[in-house]
Image: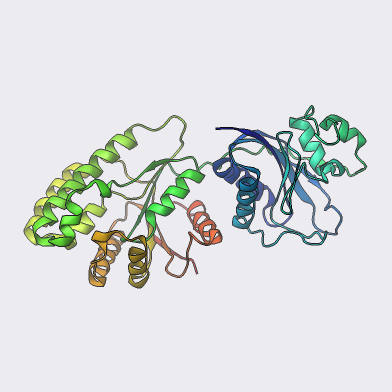
Amino acid sequence: MTMSRLILSLGSNTGDSLQILQSAIHYLHSRVGDVVQIAPVYQSPSWQFKGKDFLNTVLEIQTDLTPAEILVKTQEIEKLLGRKNKSKGGKYSDRPIDIDILYIDNKILVTNELAVPHPLLHLRNFVLVPLNDILPDFLHPLLQKTTKELVTLSPDKTKLQKLEKQLNKYIELPYNFIAIEGNIGAGKTTFAKQFAADYNAKLVLERFEENAFLPKFYEDPKRYAFPLEMSFLADRYQQLTDDLAQYDLFKTSVISDYYVFKSLIFSKVTLSEEEYQLYRKIFNFMYRDLVKPDLYVYLYQDVERLLKNIKKRGREYEQSIQPEYLKQIHDGYMNFIKTRKDLNILILNISSIDFVQNPEYYQQMLEKILNHKPHKGSKIEYIL
């Protein structure tokens, strides 16, 4: 694997610019490469147009991405943070985030989409000054001047103000253990995977595909319901006990795509009353020893959307699932949520959005979670 030294310039002048810069660094670290150095943040007047002051910084990143992949990823992050369109025809405007590629190693690259080194970097103090803080001896491959020399030779006489606030690689999650729950096909695993990757969290995924009883259950529910639910309960108990007892030294939080209480929700639907009472006794015995999530997030999608998602992902044994079964499962979750006054619960209604295809919706979901105030009981947040 070949690693490259990537130097980026970041700027923002709308919204909470400091927080936007922090979010951009956070996403760059999780999606582009390891952030090695972060320059101080500087405030400066808008450049070549009349607008609000900008906050700017510069990053050094180690990445294995190609130049084209870097460009795609940085543009995706800009869109994720609210950037609509890049400046066209040399016209500049206010913007929540701007990520410019300054250098990729000592490469000289010119295409229709990308020019490296950035053709204007030696003319901009808001780039040169923070760049000089972390890489004063970096040699411009075309101009054959170091950053320190470029600062001295810069025609830009703009004065910058250094901020005291220092930015970091990651935004720390406000919770140690977050459980992402939802009905079959709600997107909980997809969301949990991206969420954990973006926030350097330990990811715990339910091992449903390893359960040999699951395909048999969909073929003959009455016969295989009890062994299916017992095997799921045993596996969930063991997994949560092992994974939550041993926090990864390099991870600050745990995100799972289920919580063990789903065992009661599904078993209530699938088991006979006698089987359920026996099952509940076993469950209650195990549940006492398990760590409770600091935040329980329920992703709600209506039955029509769930059926479309199930069909789209194409698991053969799921294709016979009926709408009534999904409704029963949802009702079970709602009853659970209404009665669990000891848990911090957040419901996100995502029936009308596609957070996979539209990263802005994914960002909205994150904001709801990160801004959620801990409390006991449920709270509904609608995302339209």
Instruction: Please provide percent x and percent y for residue 185.
Output: 34, 61
Instruction: Please provide percent x and percent y for residue 100.
Output: 72, 47
Q: Is residue 94 left or right of residue 188?
A: right
Snapshot quadrant of residue 28: top right
Instruction: Please provide percent x and percent y for residue 95.
Output: 72, 58
Q: How is the image coloured?
A: rainbow
Figure disc tally:
0
Toward the viewer: 150 or 316? 316
Instruction: Please provide percent x and percent y for residue 349.
Output: 42, 65
- In the picture as drawn, the residue positioned furthest to the top comes out as 137
Residue 375 seen in render: no
Tell me if residue 157 comes above or below residue 250 in the rendering. Answer: below
Snapshot quadrant of residue 184: bottom left
Residue lying at 82% horizontally and 32% vertically, measured from the top left: 147
Toward the viewer: 259 or 351? 351
Toward the viewer: 207 or 264? 207
Residue 265 seen in render: yes
Residue lying at 56% horizontally and 40% vertically, measured from the top left: 170
Q: Is residue 264 left or right of residue 11?
A: left
Q: Is residue 32 left or right of residue 333?
A: right
Tell me if residue 360 comes above or below residue 202 in the rendering. Answer: below
Quadrant where the N terminus sits is top right
Toward the viewer: 111 or 361? 111
Tell me if residue 310 comes above or below residue 285 in the rendering. Answer: below
